[in-house]
Amino acid sequence: MEKETIVDNQHIKNAKKIKNMFGHIDYRNPPELCTIRDVLSLSSDKWSILIILYLGYFPILRFNKLKKYVYGISNKVLSERLKALESNGYVHREMYPEVPIRVEYSLTSFGKNYVEKLIELTEWMQLNNPTILANKEKFHIK
Amino acid sequence: MEKETIVDNQHIKNAKKIKNMFGHIDYRNPPELCTIRDVLSLSSDKWSILIILYLGYFPILRFNKLKKYVYGISNKVLSERLKALESNGYVHREMYPEVPIRVEYSLTSFGKNYVEKLIELTEWMQLNNPTILANKEKFHIK
DNA sequence: AAGAGTAAGTTACTAAATGTAACCATATGA
DNA sequence: TCATATGGTTACATTTAGTAACTTACTCTT
């Protein structure tokens, strides 16, 4: 039964962390008090994480080049996402009033910090991609 | 200049990891080849991560109880998200044909594995929440 | 036996997010 | 004069997500 004890201990440790993150595990409390929901909302769109990762790779990118890398995004949405990322402190926007105008986007130190964490998560995803694909197969064939 | 070298080295390390994740940093290649986009699509919605975290806290939850914890989600969306999470191998669904029917949701071992990584990221978010809030303030006041 | 309750969803409808494509200012080079 | 370039914006169409009422199949109460 040693193994189960280890598994249980792991779960208890995780549960503690999760509880701490939510502030409470109690659905009678209002979710406005839950910071995690607020923070997660940044990454809960189709493009923001891709933008941050590309800026993590290229320290400075201009609008149109970023658009090419984040393949498939439209001007409108890229513009919106960059504004949101800027106003949340992940991205820095530097404008040079040349002709044609030049605008450079880069990560703030906070954004770089975030990239570190993001890389850990996405590396795990990549490592487990075969498992994920296998899981999908199972369900589509059955 | 020692510090800058350290920063540079850090960036080179990260850039290497990001390149590896994308498979390539080249916008002329089709994004279908990019596994990260595919995998990210799971977490790029408003609810999936919350569902996984609550299942990380409570090892087994039934539909309506999960709905109460993931405060604000509708039946339809919870149902959809659970199907998606199940078909991607994160969540296990066990149905007991009693009356009324009982359905229990829990994380698979793969899902538990994912929770570990998720906790690291969300802990970082919580730790940095003051910074995030300060960033937002700056922009809304200016 | 009629009516209320229960769990786990569906369904039809509405609202919000996203995508498309044309447009703008300002200037340069052919 | 016309095409090109940058960094967007705007009006409109489409897709995705959210809401609230409904369903099934059975039990328990009156």
Image: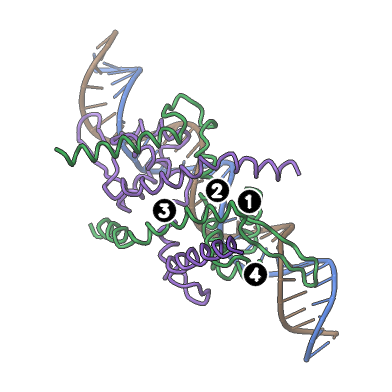
Chain colours: A green, B purple, C blue, D brown
Is disc 4 placed on a helix, strand or loop? helix
Residue tagged 2: A42
Residue A52 percent location from the top left of the image: 55, 58
Q: How many marks?
A: 4
Residue A46 percent location from the top left of the image: 51, 56
Q: Is residue B26 above or below residue A86?
A: below
Q: CA distance from mark 2 to mark 1?
A: 8 Å
Residue tagged 4: A64
Of A106 and A66, the residue lying toward us: A106
Q: Amino acid at mark 2?
A: Leu
Is disc 3 placed on a helix, strand or loop? helix
What label sits on residue A84 in the rendered view? 1
Q: Residue furthest left?
A: A1
Residue A90 percent location from the top left of the image: 60, 52
Q: Quadrant of the N terminus of chain A?
A: top left
Give the chain of mark 3.
Answer: B
Say whether marks 2 and 1 touch (CB < 8 Å).
yes
Q: CA distance from mark 3 to mark 1?
A: 21 Å
- How packed mark 2 is, by other alpha carbons closer than 10 Å (few <14, some 14-19, many 20 or more), is some
* Nearest to N terminus: mark 4 or mark 1: 4
What label sits on residue A106 in the rendered view? none
Residue tagged 3: B42
- How packed mark 3 is, by other alpha carbons closer than 10 Å (few <14, some 14-19, many 20 or more), is some
